[in-house]
């Protein structure tokens, strides 16, 4: 369930991850859990069919802004077709809040909130979740901390009570802390030999050295070992506040009932916390960095300055990226690099808009002896898009796909509640769901070509390769140089 503005990050590295993205504690009472999950799965299946037929896009029903007596706000899509309630919420403060030498604190926090809270120890809390088929989960992106609750309406009292306990009074008992610490350390050790982990670490260190974004969000063996109970309680107090809290709710609940629940769950939280200030950052290097790694293939990650989500040229950039590498099997990079020449196992590009930097990025993996040729072709395709832009046919097909596939983001209550939170986090307004497709339709071929020329420059890429070293004359990164024709997109993106 990870991501900050993940609903608008159109690439693999910035998609909201699965609910099991952090280590979980062993689950008791497997047979009872299976029975409750079978029932919940059946109801969820019925709900999904209902959503597809009657609620394909959130605009199909009025989004109500609910304000509790204490002033807590939430967006609600009320739908009583099936007895399910889905709540998503997020707090300001993600893994960028980790202290130096204590990286992994926020991610450890995500795995401990349902490991005992208030009067329930870990086993009692997990048993209570299973008894009523309650799905409760937490996760974190770089800038925000996420939570979700899925409950059957008859069990809502128990579900919201457990959520309130987890949010307000996690216990942080010694046994769960050490169990989760061991699980995280084991996970980090396994991942440390994976090319994807190595390239991500090298990317962070080269792209924004010294910035919180450069730190490993999962932590290291050393940092995870150093995290204390006090670190966890302090982080919880800093993040879990009413300031910058966003909430989205979908399902069989009315506004009056929701208002009371908002106060039950969130009103006891402090108004503000002590989040550390995270500064904006710019990409600090360009060029090629090779990280030696003995493997039969090379893993590649590349990036350059991108475009702010609220910039007027975001949608032209979104369409350009879709044609270039965001459209999976239909993209130029896929067709030219993989299909026609067989130079890559996979290749893609994306736009990412974190709170403190916007990026155009991507990646690919290729057989070691094809690395140089694959990189050369990648740069050629980026240069071709920058020079000529997409064709009229490519632009039309991209619009057709992006508009036609949009309802798939709303085919379940949980997807809709996540979208409600994402749109609030991006400050796009309640009517965004109605306006979004018109923004895509309004992009002209001239817009797309202009923005492609501004956004894309193969000479401004920072590229990291992990694999056997290539024989190149110069692989050292360089500082970005000012250019006479630098476009104003990069200069103004953060100010829009």
Image (cartoon, rainbow, N blue to C red):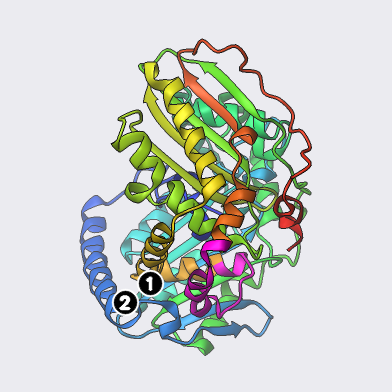
Q: Residues within 10 Å of mark 2 (few under 14, many from 20)?
A: many
Q: What residue range appears in magenta?
A: 423-446
Q: Residues within 10 Å of mark 1 (few under 14, many from 20)?
A: many
Main SS, magenta residues? helix
Residue at image mark 2: 51
Rendered residue at 50%/65% (across/down): 163
- Which residue occupies the foreground of this view, 435 or 168? 435
Instruction: Work out which quarter of the rendered image holds the C terminus and state it.
Output: bottom right
Residue 212 pos. (x, y %):
69, 39
Compared with 369, 102 (above or below) is: below
Residue 89 pos. (x, y %):
54, 65
Compared with 350, 62 (above or below) is: below
Say whether residue 398 is left or right of residue 454: left
Q: Which sits earlier in the primary sequence, circle 1 or circle 2?
A: 2
Asked if the residue at tag 2 contacts the one at tag 1, i.e. Cβ–Cβ closer than 8 Å, the answer is yes
Which element carries disc 2, helix, strand or loop?
Answer: helix
Q: Which mark is residue 413?
A: 1
């Amino acid at each position: 369930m990870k991501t900050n503005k993940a609903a608008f990050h159109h690439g693999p590295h910035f998609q909201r991850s699965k609910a099991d993205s952090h280590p979980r504690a062993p689950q008791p009472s497997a047979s009872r859990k299976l029975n409750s999950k079978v029932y919940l799965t059946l109801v969820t299946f019925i709900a999904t069919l209902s959503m597809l037929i009657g609620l394909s896009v959130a605009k199909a029903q009025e989004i109500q802004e609910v304000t509790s007596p204490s002033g807590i706000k939430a967006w609600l899509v009320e739908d009583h077709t099936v007895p399910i309630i889905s709540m998503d919420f997020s707090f300001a403060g993600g893994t960028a809040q980790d202290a130096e030498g204590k990286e992994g604190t926020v991610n450890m926090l995500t795995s401990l909130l349902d490991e005992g809270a208030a009067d329930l120890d870990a086993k009692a809390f997990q048993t209570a979740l299973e008894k009523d088929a309650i799905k409760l989960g937490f996760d974190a992106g770089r800038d925000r901390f996420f939570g979700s609750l899925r409950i059957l309406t008859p069990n809502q009292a128990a579900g919201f009570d457990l959520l309130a306990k987890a949010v307000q009074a996690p216990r942080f008992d010694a046994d769960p802390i050490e169990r989760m610490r061991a699980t995280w350390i084991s996970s980090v050790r396994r991942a440390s030999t994976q090319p994807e982990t190595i390239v991500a670490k090298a990317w962070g260190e080269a792209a924004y050295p010294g910035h919180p974004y450069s730190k490993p969000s999962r932590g290291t063996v050393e940092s995870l070992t150093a995290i204390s109970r006090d670190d966890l309680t302090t982080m919880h107090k800093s993040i879990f506040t009413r300031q910058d809290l966003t909430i989205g709710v979908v399902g069989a609940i009315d506004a009056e009932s929701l208002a009371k629940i908002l106060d039950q769950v969130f009103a006891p939280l402090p108004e503000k916390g002590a989040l550390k200030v995270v500064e904006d950052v710019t990409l600090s290097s360009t060029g090629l960095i090779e990280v030696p790694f003995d493997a039969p293939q090379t893993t590649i990650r590349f990036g350059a300055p991108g475009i702010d989500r609220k910039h007027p040229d975001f949608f032209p950039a979104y369409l350009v990226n879709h044609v270039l590498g965001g459209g999976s099997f239909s993209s130029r990079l896929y067709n030219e690099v993989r299909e026609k020449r067989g130079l890559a196992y996979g290749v893609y590009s994306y736009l990412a808009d974190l709170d403190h930097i916007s990026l155009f990025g991507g990646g690919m993996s290729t057989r070691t002896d094809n690395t140089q040729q694959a990189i050369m072709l990648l740069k050629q395709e980026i240069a071709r898009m920058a020079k000529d832009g997409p064709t009229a046919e490519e632009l039309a097909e991209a619009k057709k796909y992006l508009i036609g596939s949009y309802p798939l983001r709303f085919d379940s209550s949980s997807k809709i509640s996540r979208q409600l939170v994402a749109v609030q986090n991006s400050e796009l307004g309640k009517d965004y769901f109605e306006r979004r497709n018109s923004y895509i339709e309004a992009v002209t071929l001239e817009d797309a070509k202009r923005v492609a020329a501004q956004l894309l420059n193969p000479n401004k890429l920072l590229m990291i390769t992990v694999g056997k070293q290539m024989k190149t004359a110069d692989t050292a990164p360089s500082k970005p140089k000012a250019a006479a024709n630098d476009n104003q997109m990069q200069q103004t993106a953060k100010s829009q």
